[in-house]
Image (cartoon, helix red, strand yellow):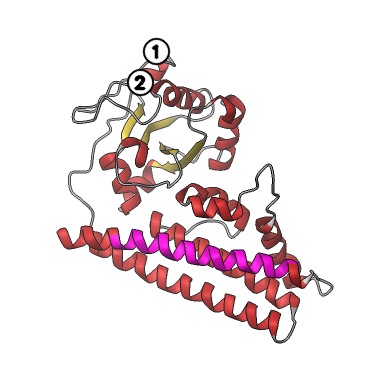
Amino acid sequence: METNQNPVQENAAQRIVPEPGQPAERLYNPAEAARIVQCLTDGYFDPEYILLFGNLAGGTPHSDAVAYDLLMVVRETPEYDWIRAKRILRYRMPVKHRDIAYINLYIMTLNYVESNKTPFLYFAHSEGELLYCSDHCHFRRPKHPIDFAKAYADAKLHYDTFRMLGNELIEQAREALSESRNIRLAALFSAQAAVYFYHTLYYVYHGQEFDSHDPVVMHDRMRTLSTKLMLTFDDTNIERIFTLPCLKKFLVKARYDLGFDIAPQELEMHLQRVEKMGDIIENYAGLRLELYKELSERQ
C-alpha cells in the first residue's frame, strides 16, 4: 500500500522500507537513493512523486548500464530541465562518491502522465518503487495494463519509418563518399542518419517524439539504454572519441558552408561509427518491440 510519507524530509540517510511483495535485498544503496531525492527536492523541484523503475527496482529492464532510472512527475513545467537536473546532481553528488555512477532522470508533468498511456509510463508506474511522494499527492498504481497491441503497432510504425530513413541516408553517404567524392554531402547524410537512428530508439522506448535533433543531447539522453552505444561514442581517459560533436557540426556546416571540408579518412571513421550505431539501435529497439508484441499476445 502506498503512503504519502516522505522519508527524505525526515532523514536523508533513512533506509527506504520495502513495499509488500518487494525483496528486502536491494540492488542499490537506499541511503544513496534518498540523497538523490533530497538533492532534487532541496529548492530545485517541487515534485508530486519520484519513482525508481527498471532494473534496480526489479522491474522491466530499461537502462542496459547500471543506472538509477528515475521518473520525476511535477505539476508545472519546472525551471530546470533534465540536462540541468543532471548537472545539479553531478555538482552535489560527484560521480566518484556514488555507488552507482549513472542517473537517468525523466521529468514529466502530471498532466502529460495522466493523459498518455505508453509502455514507458506503464512500466514505471506499475513496477516502479516510490522514493518520494508529496503530502498532497495520492499515488496510485495502474489498475489495468495498457493496450500493448496498439503500443506495438505505433512503435513498429515509427521503427520502420526512421530506421529506413537512416539506412537510406547511410547508403547515400557511402555513395557520395566513394563514387562522387562529395565530402560535404557524405558528412551531412551521416549526421542526419544518426539523428534518425536516435529518434528510432527514443520512440520505441518512450512512445513519444524526442524534442531535440542534436546528436550530442540525444546520446546523453539515451546512452544508458545501451552499453554498446556508450562504447561506440563515449570519450575515455585514453581515447578521445569526438564523433558526436563532429556530427552536430556537420548538420550545420555541411548544409550551409560552401567551404566545408574534412579529410576523407576522418569522415570514413565517423561514418563507420554511425553504421555501427544503426545496427546497435536496430537490435535494441527490435528487442523492445518483441516485448510489446509478447505482452500484447498475452492480453
In the displayed orientation, state which residue is furthest to the top: 10
In the displayed orientation, state which residue is furthest to the right: 259
Q: Position of residue 164 (x, y in %)?
A: 47, 76
Q: Please give the name of the residue rendered at 67% of the width and 62% of the height, measured from the top-left corner.
A: 247
Asked whether residue 94 appears in the rendered view, the answer is no
Stretch of the chain drawn in magenta: 266-290
Are dots 1 and 2 in contact, CB under 8 Å?
A: yes
Q: Which amino acid does label 2 sit on?
A: Asn
Give the image quarter of residue 83. top right
Q: Does the magenta stretch include residue 125?
A: no
- Determine which residue is flagged by label 2: 6
Q: Which amino acid does label 1 sit on?
A: Glu
User: On the rendered image, what quadrant is the N terminus found in?
Assistant: top left
Q: Where is residue 223 in the image (x, y as percent from the top left)?
A: 52, 50
Mark 1 crowd level (few <14, some 14–19, many ≥20, 10 Å Cα)? few
In 3D space, how far apart are the residues under numbered discs 1 and 2 (Cα atoms)? 7 Å
Q: Please give the name of the residue rendered at 24% of the width and 64% of the height, measured from the top-left corner.
A: 149
- Determine which residue is flagged by label 1: 10
In the displayed orientation, state which residue is furthest to the bottom: 179
Seen in the picture, residue 256 relative to 139 is either above or below; the reply is: below
Q: Position of residue 34 (x, y in %)?
A: 42, 23
